[in-house]
Structure formats: C-alpha cells, structure tokens
Image (spheres, grey):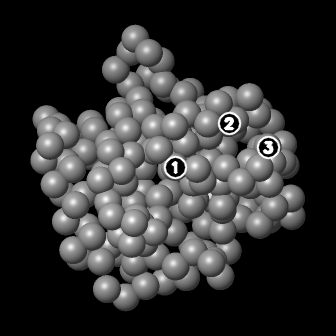
Amino acid sequence: MKTRNLTQDLNVSAIGYGAMGLSEFYGETDDRSALQLLDSLVDLDINFIDTADLYGRGHNERLIGQFLARLDKRSRQQIKVATKCGIERAVDQAYARVINNQPDYIIQCCNDSLKRLGVEQIDLFYLHRVSQSAPIEHNMDCLSQQVKQGKIRHIGLCEVSAATLQRAHAVHPVAVCRQNILYGPGILKRRSCRW
C-alpha cells in the first residue's frame, strides 16, 4: 500500500477507511461483522480510519476502540485514527442536529472521544462543521489547547472557505482541510487537502 504524509509526522495509507456506515445510515449494522471488516484493514495495509462522535452517537468510536484494543502492539502502532466533533445530535430524535463549536462542547467531545476510542491521544481531530456564530480563532484556540495538553496530535477542519482556513491556520497549524466538492450534476466527492 502506498502511503502519504499528511504532516511531517503523520504518514497514512493512500487509501483510508471511512467507518461511518458501520454504525448507521446504510441499513442494518452488525458489530461482529464490522470488527471482522476492521481486522481485514490490517491485512490490506490500510492504516488510516476516519470516524466521528456523530456516527451512531458514539457507537462508531466505541467500535473502533474495540478494534484497536484487539490489535497486537506492532499493528496498533501503525493505525492512525481521525475523528470529528462540532455537530450535536438530539438524544430523542433520529437525526436532528445543530452545529456546536462552543469551547466547553469541544473539550467535552474530545474527552469523550478519547474514552470511547480507548486512546491517550487522537491522531487527527477535526472540527466537523464550523459555526458562523463565533470567530474561528476561538475554536482554534480551544483546539490548540487540546494539542498542548497532549490530547490530540493534529487539527483538521471540514467545510471551510479559504479565508476561514487562513485565519484558523494563523492561530495554530491546520494539518488537513476536508471539503465536499461537486463534480457534475449531483455527484458529490470528498477531498482532503493538505495545508
């Protein structure tokens, strides 16, 4: 498997695995089958897994945590995990959600993700969506504090403009900016751009 450097010290497989569908959105889910699928990533030399606290209201991160706990030491050191925060889901509604970038919420999400994943540090922690109600500088300052405390290695942003990305990067380096790009009528592609 070819690899790519997202940063000088974050080398990942050229093909990563987006784990969202293991928890919801695409029909029935089965944890046993999901864990078998995750185990197969090791054999394929895929070492980059993308999840979010939003997926299954934490179920996806717990599933990734179970997978990580089953790995031998060498395999575990190879796997890099990206997760996201910033979209809050209502507990009693199927998919009602709001963007929440309040510092207290970001810190809570980071701590909860660390516990669910069973890790001491998250390799790449994204702000899943950016709220227009607070300056991006406030969000980046909060995320930067999580880096300084050793909870996350790198910061990522999703769905931001070039101007917002520049303002964010002025506060703390943004390792990855993930965008949805439309190609042709109704065809949605995801693209990660190194900053």
Q: First in sequence: mark 2 or mark 1?
A: 2
Name the residue carrying label 3.
142
For this rendering, which residue is in front, 60 or 36? 36
Q: Is residue 178 above or below residue 101?
A: below
Q: What element carries label 1?
A: loop
Name the residue carrying label 1.
119
Residue at 55% of width from left, 33% of height from top? 112
Task: Give residue 56's quadrant in the image.
Answer: top left
Residue at 62% of width from left, 40% of height from top? 110
- Whether the residues at callouts 2 and 3 have beta carbons within 8 Å, the answer is yes
Name the residue carrying label 2.
106
Q: Is residue 52 visible?
A: no
Q: In this view, does 62 lie above or below 77?
A: above
Give the residue type at disc 3.
Cys
Residue 175 picture location, percent across and down: 66, 68
Residue 180 picture location, percent across and down: 48, 59
Task: Give residue 109's quadrant in the image.
Answer: top right
Q: Nearer the viewer, mark 2 or mark 1?
A: 1
For this rendering, which residue is in front, 113 or 89? 113
Q: What element carries label 3?
A: helix
Give the residue type at disc 2.
Ile
Give the residue type at disc 1.
Val
Residue 150 picture location, percent across and down: 71, 54
Residue at 41% of width from left, 42% of height from top? 61
Q: CA–CA distance between discs 2 and 3?
A: 8 Å
Q: Is mark 2 on a helix, strand or loop?
A: helix
- Whether the residues at callouts 2 and 1 have beta carbons within 8 Å, the answer is no
Q: Does residue 91 appear left or right of residue 36 in this picture?
A: right
